[in-house]
Image: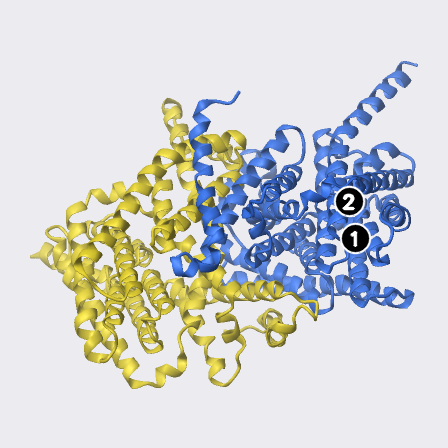
Chain colours: A yellow, B blue
Amino acid sequence: MFKRKFLLPILGILFMIPALVSAAEHAEEGAAHGTSHAVIVLAFIALIVVLAKIAGAVAEKFNQVSVLGELLLGVLLGIPVLFGIQFFDAFKTDEFVLLFSEFAVILLLFQTGLESDLYKMGKVGIPAFLVAIIGVIAPFLLGTYIVGPWLMPGLDSTSYLFLGATLTATSVGITARVFKDLKMLQSRSSQIVLGAAVIDDVLGLLILAVVAAIVTAGHVSTGEVAIIATKALAFLVASIAIGRLIAPYVGTFLSKVHAGIGMKMAMALFFCLGYAYLSTLVGLAPIVGAFAAGLLLDTVHFKRFRSPRLVREIEEAMTECTDNNVKVCVTKAIDEHRHRHVEDLIEGISQWVVPVFFVITGLQVNLSVLANVNVLLVALGLTVAAIVGKLVAGFAAGKGADWKSVGVGMIPRGEVGLIFANVGKALGVVNDEAFAAIVIMIIITTIFTPVVLPMIAKMNEKKEKVQATA
Amino acid sequence: MFKRKFLLPILGILFMIPALVSAAEHAEEGAAHGTSHAVIVLAFIALIVVLAKIAGAVAEKFNQVSVLGELLLGVLLGIPVLFGIQFFDAFKTDEFVLLFSEFAVILLLFQTGLESDLYKMGKVGIPAFLVAIIGVIAPFLLGTYIVGPWLMPGLDSTSYLFLGATLTATSVGITARVFKDLKMLQSRSSQIVLGAAVIDDVLGLLILAVVAAIVTAGHVSTGEVAIIATKALAFLVASIAIGRLIAPYVGTFLSKVHAGIGMKMAMALFFCLGYAYLSTLVGLAPIVGAFAAGLLLDTVHFKRFRSPRLVREIEEAMTECTDNNVKVCVTKAIDEHRHRHVEDLIEGISQWVVPVFFVITGLQVNLSVLANVNVLLVALGLTVAAIVGKLVAGFAAGKGADWKSVGVGMIPRGEVGLIFANVGKALGVVNDEAFAAIVIMIIITTIFTPVVLPMIAKMNEKKEKVQATA
């Protein structure tokens, strides 16, 4: 399987590592050696990007989502430190790497916002909302009041809060991907799960805002919780409303100045990073603002920006038209083009920026902690809570949907859970043990759905056949 | 001309500035306020990107290249500091901003390398080489031995060296753009200028390596200069040769792992930043390595990567085919696609990253220095040396080419001169006065060609007509 011709490129990739190792060791004196710290970090990030893309591709070959491969790569890169090699460890606390990582997660939530379609979600509104709410409350209670205090006694109550909060997330991306692979995207179960996952994103960000504020303030009071939740919700609603009002004008103005792709990208990033900044001004995490920016730009179709591709796409659409509906075809092509292109542009950056976030997150796992049996127990407890909590939510799907498919579809925690864990670690309420346990839980729940959902789909098919023949 | 509907978007863009101002003032205590320094800087960069794109577009509306608008924007943003407002000034020394700026210039040289076609250049090899050599030597001598010591007496000899070195550059981009606008790209004069400009890039990097080494060592010896020049040339030749050998294998390997665009981008960045790092290991500037990486990847056509666009492009090509040459058409479309796409991908990032470099460079100009009459004199002297030095080179173009067009075509210093000035500033041999003078010289030489070249083209046309009627 392993071909000899792969030897040279692998050597090619590896040949930089020893150089980087020595560079990292001399990073302090870097300037004297003529190598600036910035150049070393940039080369390191480039190395991580390539390794992350390889790891993601390997995961996909095992029918897993690429985020899993990236996360595991990060965990594996933590192995050398157990043997005293500090190479990757030196970078994981580097401020440039953390800046890049912060940019990556902001971009990820922006993209999530862009891909969330609030209108589509409305169609399965009520069951989706119920599934989302129960899917948030059940694991949160299980984590905060049972798994946390039971398996990790003696911690601060805010730590349990964070543990519970981490369990509330649902990863839209992973779920959507599995349903797509099963060709079930249009099924009612799938629609409910996707709707619920988007609502979960919003709820999760609200929970994160509340929990983070509680941790910072150091105490809990129902009144304060209400204030923070209201503030967060008000920010989301107001910023999206104001943004929707302003964005078309900004778009018109900027496209008059210059109608190229570069300007469009500049505008998208301006909203993304500007909103991320604004949300921190009202005391929320930057990702809340980035998500809001994505949601609002999703509906602004950048009408006035043209692109070199447009002409081509129109011509294509016309070849598919009959003479009678040429106008409809062309209009549709233009609309699709406008709509799709912001996401395409962001995808061009996020494709190589975002994986770095997952690798760095994996790298944050302190592997020596895994020898601690208690950590594995906590991980197990969290995983059970994570699975049970979302399966319970499946019951709320109601008629016309399969509760098992819905419940299992909600289980992956993926990137959102990782973001929670990271914020908690930065705030100091998620210790090394809890962090490692959370990462293990996320890995297991993320593998769970792609393995179990196809089995359920097969079972249901058989049942239908039996009923049909009966 | 100014429409009322532009009011809202302009307000929209401006509404962030006061918030950013207060944030910058509190940047130190940022963490306590819940706003991380990283988020502030990211929002600042997003603001700069939008402003830079606007400035670039405005310059284009005046038939100037966008780099000019970006540079002038940076200079203008330095005005508030004259009135005691430190906002932009606080960011210009921020390490995150400088990291971004470093990344931008590395990307710029990588792109320059990608766009340089060594084979094409070979066709006008000898005259282009002569023009390049004379166009480097003449302004270098004028700057180092006449303008520098004469107008800025009392400085260290290394400062004069750097002043001279800054005058050697030729900006391929600006020149190509003007010839393109005049529909003269295929003329012999144009070919010679473009060839000479590419050679100038290589020579310029060699000169930069030598001059920087001299500055660091503090003294000059012919033997050492020879060693450094040899080392730099050896690095360029060896790294390109080794890279060309390895890159196809790396490409094959990575495309087998995953054939998507993300991986292709990862590979391009890996080479770009890896080479930038390697070049610093042998004591050269990171941009030398980035340029080498661009040159070598230019010839590696990423054969095995596919892209969602490919199918479309093939279909298009087929519609243009007659039945007899379908195979030729399709092959050509695939080849073009492969070849073009790396540059397209990088363009997607560089379009919004690179302008930041020019704005920050403009911001480095200490405006209070401009009140100094001597600075304006130096700027004038440098500009005359810059113009005369390259006009002289035009004579080497020989028969079949117009020496005036060639000479004027070589005059723009553009981005390469700015890079030199920045390096010199970082090394401490280009003081505030010299830096301001260099920036003024670059602005004037960059405006010069787009204004004068069309005049020469018109004159030549008239002359031809007169000769034809005679």
The one nearer the camera, B120 or A119, is: A119
The residue labelled by disc 1 is B204
Q: Is any part of residue A319 visible from this angle?
A: no
Label 2 sits on a secondary structure element that is loop
Q: Is any part of residue A362 visible from this angle?
A: yes
The one nearer the camera, A2 or A90, is: A90
Residue A127 rendering spot, x and y as whole percentages: 15, 50
Parent chain of label 1: B
Q: Point out the tag, 2 or 1, that comes first from the N-terminus.
A: 2
Residue B42 rendering spot, x and y as whole percentages: 49, 52
Label 1 sits on a secondary structure element that is helix
From this view, report whether residue B470 is shown above or below residue B286.
above
Residue B141 rendering spot, x and y as whole percentages: 90, 49
From this view, report whether residue A224 is shown above or below residue A435.
above
Left/right of residue A200 with respect to residue A307 in the rendered view: left
The residue labelled by disc 2 is B170
- Tag 2 near tag 1, CB within 8 Å: yes
The one nearer the camera, B317 or A246, is: A246
Parent chain of label 2: B
**Dot 2 alpha-carbon crowd within 10 angstroms: few under 14, some 14 to 19, many 20 or more:** many
Left/right of residue A142 with respect to residue A467 in the rendered view: right
